[in-house]
Image: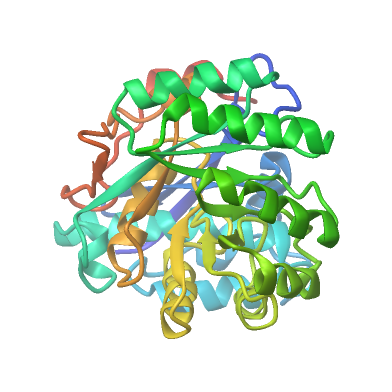
Amino acid sequence: MKITRVEAIHLRLPEVNERCDGSQETLVVKVHTDAGLVGVGEVDSSSLVARAIIEAPLSHKICRGLAECVAGEDPFEIDRLIHRMYEGSIFFGRQGAAIQAMSGIEIALWDIVGKATKRPVYQLLGGGFRKTFRAYASILFGDTPAETERIGRSLAGQGFRAVKFGWGPMGQSEESDIAHVKAARRGIGDGIELMVDAGLCWDTATAIRRAQQFEQFNLTWLEEPLHPDNVEGYGRLSARSPMRIAAGEEVCDIKEFQRLMDVGGIDVAQVDVTRVGGLSRSKRIGYDAAERHRLCVNHSYKTGVNIAASLHFVACLPNTHYFEYCVEQGALRQTLTRQRFPVVGGEIAVPEEPGLGVELDEAVVAKYRVG
């Protein structure tokens, strides 16, 4: 079997705003083969940038588009193709959007191999430590504390046993920060886990103060309170925080994750399979976390393609039982894949179908396709 074509498909809702909702647009990747099998992946990046990185023609040996790096190759040779993409784009890549773009192709390769062998991807990655995960509803804070409380009450009523609020008004003022977290806890009640994603909004001293102020609300973790470059600040915060500190969704590089754990002292490594180069690199980061006795969880704020790939990723890890479950109601998040991934009793199940276990709704693709 050989790869014949890589198709990068930009999808975008008619209206996109500045809310930190990554499900408003996305880049879906299809890898076609001469055997008729087509693998599907997704990229979480600036979609037009990532599409250009995939489609770019040859400039010279170490400056070429990712599609050219894998054309004519055997899709089963995933590790070798990751290396070809990394080395082929090393002139302009090594980090950031180039690694993010690699993710879509790499995930699609796993989908092909799973379909060809009639095995779910998690089995190909080494086997499932768990088949179900506690799905925490992931949503943005409301514009007001009253709206945050209402959202929390609604999610608790839907049966979620863990909820994470993020971004939005965090960082506007001490009074507002505390009011929103208090409202979130009041909305979901005392029996449900609460996580807070601060959205990179504080300096180190403020983050330490907020962590101590939030202790009364019994957070499972405080996420991304600092800029990802402030690794030393994470170290200071982690040493003084009364709750777990989580970070990593902005990170694409394996060594940067290691530094966040070793210098930054984070307790929870958050890995997005559509940002770090795909499933193989995600698993490597997950095991780096396991060797350091840290929790590893997925970051997922895209479509059903990301959800499926992330479920296969966390299934192959020994050090997690949580799953980030984006509850945004946009059409791409809710309808791009025919599979809906229901949460039952607060748990989400790993797909057992061959490959990723997802099928795109081509009518939705056609409706939101750009260009």
The residue lying furthest to the front in this view is 216
Q: Quadrant of residue 23?
A: top right
Q: Position of residue 264 (x, y in %)?
A: 69, 75
Using the rendered view, name the quadrant where residue 113 is placed.
Answer: bottom left
- 72 vs 201, nearest the viewer: 201
- Locate residue 242 relative to residue 240 in the image: left or right: left
Res 9 visible: no
Q: Is residue 332 above or below residue 150?
A: below
* Above-or-below relation of 213 to 89: above
Q: Nearer the viewer, residue 340 or 10?
A: 340
The picture places residue 370, in percent across and down from the top left corner, at: 63, 25
Residue placed at 73% from the left, 50% from the top?
A: 210
x and y percentages locating residue 69 in the rendered image:
57, 67
Look at the picture and state if 33 lies above or below 333. below
Quadrant of the rendering where the C terminus is positioned: top right
Count the marks: how many? 0
Quadrant for residue 340, please give it: top left
Image spot of residue 263 (x, y percent): 69, 81
Q: State which quarter of the image contains the N terminus.
A: bottom left
Image vertical order of residue 354 relative to residue 98, above or below: above
